[in-house]
Structures are given as C-alpha cells and as structure tokens.
Amino acid sequence: MSKKFAVIALSLMILAGCASYPEQVRIADNVALTSYENAAQQNIDFGTARWSGVIAEVSNKTNQTRLEVVYFPSGTNGRPHVSDQTKGRFVAYIKGFLDPMVYQPGKSVTVLGELTRSEIGKVDEYEYRYPVIKDATVYLWPKLQDRVEVIETWPMMRPHPYYWGYGPGIRIRTTTKQQSTTQGPVHVDNNKQNKVQP
C-alpha cells in the first residue's frame, strides 16, 4: 500500500512540476530535453530544447523572426534567474512576425522548440557559435515590479520644527512580485502563424 502511495505521490510531483511552466511552453512528461550546456559545449543539433533567458536582439525576416537570447538558468516555473553571469547565447526562429516594441531587448522569455544546426555570428567583433532552436514557441514573461511593505514602526530620534526629540519611525521591506497579467502575457503559438496574441 505504501509503495502504491509513493508511486502516486511521485507522479503528482512530476505533473505539478510540468504544470508550473506556462501552458505555451509545457511538454509531455516523457519528452527528453537537451540542456543548453550540452548543446553549446557538444554542438548538439537535434532533440527538443526549452531554454530561458533575456532578449538581446530581435530581427524580423520575410516569413520568420530571429530572436537572439542571452541564456540564464530557469527556476521551477521557467522564469530565468537573471544575474551578472551567463553561460552564453542562443538563437530562436519563430514563424511569423514579432513586434520589436513588444519583444524588446532586456525582456525575459522561455523558448521551446527543436534544435537544428548551430550558426556562426558575431557579438560585436567576437565570433560566436549560437545553438539554434527552430520553429520555436516563445513565452514572454511579464515584468516584475517592486512593492514596498511596512514591517513595523518604532520611536526614533528625529528633528522637530524647534527641537530634537523622539518621533515615529518605520522599517520597510522591498519585495519583488510579478505584475498583474489579467489579459495574459504576450506569446507566439506555432499553430497560429503570423499572429501575436495579447
């Protein structure tokens, strides 16, 4: 009985992990993913990839858009953990048009698609080999915003108009939370070519 319970619990944990990603970039439990590190270091050009990062450049072609992304490892929900260190860049090709005013450099994305042959390009004057995801689906993460929260108040020395004395003070905490997405974040659906959904 306990073994059966353990199997059920494990299955629920796996499902919960998959469900934490946005719907547009979810995959089935049995789909194996190629890590960015393996693709970049071993020049792997096949398999399914789901990587997150920050947009560096967007370039619209005749029938597709080239998205250059600075890779950052993702959390359990897929949002990239942005820091001052990165393991590299990758390129994603999306069918149709992506508005550069929406997909601006600096915005966070998660990309899902099939790997294909890498391409050689340049970052400034530095020659760079990009792992490439073709026919990609892109999830554009909503912005994060800071919230200031009052933790407690206490008396503190402070100047009054005519004397120094004790008055009320506050201690605050700043936290970062996800911006409201009542209408949902912008994303591209491969099944709806040339359309950007709000």
Image: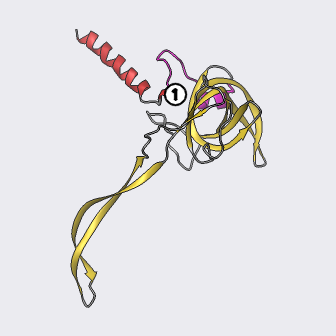
Quadrant location, the C terminus: top right
**Residue at position x 47%, y 31% from top?**
22
Quarter of image, res 44: top right
Give the quadrant of residue 169: bottom left
Residue closest to the far bottom: 162
Q: Residue at x 43, y 40 (%)?
A: 182
Residue 185 percent location from the top left of the image: 50, 38
Indicate whether residue 37 is drawn in magenta: yes
Q: Secondary structure at mark 1?
A: helix
Q: Is residue 164 placed above or below 47 in the rendered structure?
A: below
Q: Position of residue 170 (x, y in %)?
A: 27, 67
Q: Nearer the viewer, residue 150 or 189?
A: 189
Label 1, residues with CA under 10 Å away: few <14, some 14-19, many ≥20: some
Above or below 57: residue 135: above
Q: Considering the image in quadrants, where does the N terminus appear?
A: top left
Q: Nearer the viewer, residue 93 or 82?
A: 93
Q: Which portion, as a residue range, is magenta? A: 25-44
Task: Give the vertical position of 159 relative to 115 (above or below).
Answer: below
